[in-house]
Amino acid sequence: MAKVFRRTSHTHGPVVDWDDHDFLTRRLYATECAAYKRLQSHPEIAVHLPEYFGPINESTLSLPPSTSGQPYVAGCAFRLERLSGTDIKMAFVPQPTQQQAEAVLEAIRDLCPRINVWDASCFIPGPRSGFALIDFAYWEDLSDLQVYLDEHKHIPAALRARLAVIP
């Protein structure tokens, strides 16, 4: 399956310049890609994740228009193993699986600084273990930058250059 990022407004007000919003989307994408790449080399964690096959060019996919009507952001797509079943938000994962999944999320957080793992969802069972996690690599700086963009209407190049994804 492919995860393809579409254009979205990251503020509450009207969009002044889509370039700023697309920049934030590209950072979300880069954070998730970096986390998957790093975690694939840790088999004790990778067993709980869909297999990551790397970036793909979304223009080569036969994609219908996005449901929001917004275009997809160029260069922001990757391929993952398809998980079967229904995802469950972590708060609703039954024990003892929730405790086990939270331990994996904490290990992910330790290996991949600058991410928020707590928006993750869980599939039970996973293809190679009792559970699989998705959406575990949310860029932790996003909320602060959304507020900044809302207030200042632009993210200057100097600020963009200082923003790290995963070191």
Image (cartoon, rainbow, N blue to C red):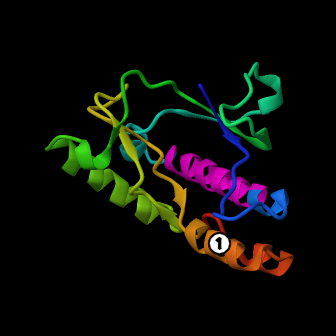
Residue toward you, 69 or 72: 69
Q: Secondary structure at mark 1?
A: helix
Other residues around mark 1 within 10 Å, as few (<14) / some (14–19) / many (≥20): some
Using the rendered view, name the quadrant where residue 144 is placed.
Answer: bottom right
Locate the C terminus and report the quarter of the image it occupies: bottom right
**Most common secondary structure along the magenta stretch:** helix
**Where in the figure is residue 69, as x and y percent of width and height?**
73, 35
Q: Residue furthest left?
A: 96
In the picture, measured across the screen, residue 57 lies left or right of residue 1, that is: right
Amino acid type, callout 1: Leu
| Residue 61 included in the magenta stretch of the image | no
- In the displayed image of the protein, which residue is found farthest to the front? 14
Residue 92, placed above or below residue 12: above
How many discs mark residues in the rendered view? 1
> Which residue is drawn at the image coordinates 70% and 41% (left, top)?
6
Give the percent coordinates (x, y) of residue 68.
67, 37
Q: Write the residue at 75% across / 59% down.
A: 21
Which region of the structure is painted magenta? 22-40
| Residue 149 x/y as whole percent | 71, 72
Q: Please tell me which residue lies in front, 104 or 40.
A: 104
Quadrant of res 157: bottom right
Q: Residue at x 52, y 57 (%)?
A: 138
Q: Is residue 135 above or below residue 67?
A: below
* Position above or below: 89 against 162: above
Indicate the position of residue 161 as horizontal and vertical percent values: 79, 75
Residue annotated with mark 1: 145
- Quadrant into which the N terminus falls: top right
- Magenta includes 28? yes
